[in-house]
Image: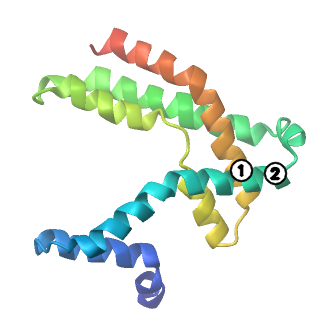
Amino acid sequence: MEWKKIISNINVLAIIAGLLLFFCKIKLPAVIIAPINDIGNMLAPLSMIVTGMLMADSPILASLKNAKLYLFSAIRLVIWPTILLLIMCVSHVYEFIPDGRTLLLIVYLASITPSASTITQMVQVYNKDATYSSLLNVFTTLFCIITMPLAVILFSWLIL
């Protein structure tokens, strides 16, 4: 991969700047921090607006017949978390870490969440299929209403 493409990516530049600020222990003034916090607070609502706009253009009823959406949702919300939970159970890693059960619950909760709304924006920025991405986001969000409580119950039976 070309370095020019990597360096010109705004996300990579933001990560590099953040790492420099963190490791050099540089504190930004409040004049800079306040607008950054405001922009960060707008991120979730704006991503939902963009997803909603993309969904308005998509044929929702026709997409209900798309097996890939169900397969992706099953992999993201059921198969991957089940594999992770089995690894946690078999390895007993929670016994070697202080507050291991709580830390593993946090990791597990992150693994059972729906696909991120920001993926929809990234797909749109790179001129890929944003409608399909927004459908994935909506499908996984709807399905996690069922899968998340069941996954947490399973975690509590096996680990807690």
Is residue 122 toward the left or the right of residue 69 in the image?
A: left
Q: Secondary structure at mark 2?
A: helix
Q: Which residue is mark 1?
A: 52
Which amino acid type is marked by label 2? Ala
Which residue occupies 63% across, 64% down? Answer: 123
**Could you tell me how far apart the alpha carbons at marks 1 and 2 are, in whole angstroms?**
6 Å
> Compared to 115, does 25 lie above or below?
below
Q: Position of residue 40 (x, y in %)?
A: 41, 60
Q: Are dots 1 and 2 in contact, CB under 8 Å?
A: yes
Q: At 37% from the left edge and 31% from the top edge, which residue is drawn?
A: 108
Q: Which residue lies most toward the top here? A: 157
Residue located 11% across and 75% down the image? 24
Q: Nearer the viewer, residue 22 or 110?
A: 22
Residue 145 location, quadrant: top right
Q: How is the image coloured?
A: rainbow
Tag 1's secondary structure? helix
Which amino acid type corresponds to the residue marked 1 in the rendered image?
A: Gly
At 82% from the left and 40% from the top, the residue drawn is 66
Horizontal and vertical percent for residue 124?
A: 66, 67
Q: Is residue 97 left or right of residue 51?
A: left
Q: Residue 51 location, x and y as percent?
A: 67, 52
Say few, some or many: other residues with alpha carbon within 10 Å of mark 2 (under 14 / 14 to 19 / 20 or more): few
Q: Quadrant of the C terminus?
A: top left
Is residue 1 something that shows in the picture? no
User: Does residue 44 lie above or below 122 as drawn?
Assistant: above
Is 54 left or right of 94, judged from the image as shown? right
Residue 29 picture location, percent across and down: 20, 74
Q: Which mark is residue 89?
A: none
Q: Which residue is mark 2?
A: 56
Looking at the image, can residue 28 be seen? yes
